[in-house]
Amino acid sequence: MSINKKAKSHDLLHDNPFAINVLASGQEQLALNFAGKHDPKLDIPWREGQTAPYLGGTVAHFQCEPHEAYDGGDHTLFIGQVVHFRYNDGDALGYFRSRFTRLTEPRVAASPGTHDPFELPYDAYE
Ligand SMILES: Cc1cc2nc3c(=O)[nH]c(=O)nc-3n(C[C@H](O)[C@H](O)[C@H](O)COP(=O)(O)O)c2cc1C
């Protein structure tokens, strides 16, 4: 992930585990809370992970061990090694042209032979 060097979370990410949360449609308030509009009354659905705390009610999360950090100018690119993940059915929350939008889950069954992206043979690229 790419984090602005001026963000409060930036220095915490160095050499620490972290989680990537793919928010579900309807979790706009959570998104805003972590995008600088902190809401002290918001009930944050923290879940204890094996590696890092993550958020409940999302469509997916990835718990990562720190792997590498690259200088990206005014941002740092933190690369994590995914050690645990989970995904759920449902629509995801998107952000497009400064507005939240719904990323709709495909309703039609995948055609036979379509790969599950979580089961891609990554070693095929080696
Ligand atoms: C949809 C959306 C996506 C964002 N993505 C990023 C991002 O990838 N990297 C980043 O540094 N800030 C991003 N931001 C801005 C941060 O959320 C914002 O700077 C936040 O205040 C940083 O929080 P912190 O200072 O508490 O760590 C994004 C904001 C929005 C609304």
Image (tube, helix red, strand yellow):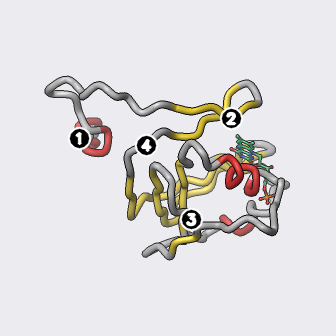
Q: Residue at x 74, y 63 (%)?
A: 9
Does residue 20 lie above or below 66 as drawn?
Answer: above
Q: Residues within 10 Å of mark 3 (few under 14, many from 20)?
A: many
Q: Secondary structure at mark 3?
A: strand
* Mark 3 or mark 1: whose residue is earlier in sequence: 3
Instruction: Estimate the x, y position of residue 89 in percent, counting from the top left.
Output: 38, 45
Q: Quadrant of residue 36?
A: bottom right
Cα–Cα gap, marks 2 and 4: 16 Å
Q: Residues within 10 Å of mark 2 (few under 14, many from 20)?
A: some
Q: Residues within 10 Å of mark 4 (few under 14, many from 20)?
A: some
> What is the three-letter code of the residue carrying label 4?
Gly
Task: Work out whether residue 61 or residue 63 is closer to the camera in this orientation and state it.
Answer: 61
Task: Work out whether residue 70 or residue 39 is closer to the camera in this orientation and state it.
Answer: 39
Q: Nearer the viewer, mark 3 or mark 2?
A: 2
Does residue 104 lie above or below 88 as drawn?
Answer: above
Q: Residues within 10 Å of mark 1 (few under 14, many from 20)?
A: few
Does residue 58 lie above or below 123 as drawn?
Answer: below
Q: Which of the numbered marks, if any, corresponds to residue 121?
A: 1
Image-based side of 81 in relation to 109, left or right: right
Q: Nearer the viewer, mark 1 or mark 4?
A: 4
Q: Nearer the viewer, mark 3 or mark 1?
A: 3
> What is the three-letter code of the residue carrying label 1?
Pro
> What is the three-letter code of the residue carrying label 2?
Phe
Residue identifier under label 4: 90
Residue identifier under label 3: 18
Cα–Cα gap, marks 3 and 2: 24 Å
Image-based side of 108 in relation to 28, left or right: left
Cα–Cα gap, marks 3 and 1: 25 Å
Instruction: Estimate the x, y position of residue 47 in percent, counting from the top left.
Output: 52, 72
Residue identifier under label 2: 100
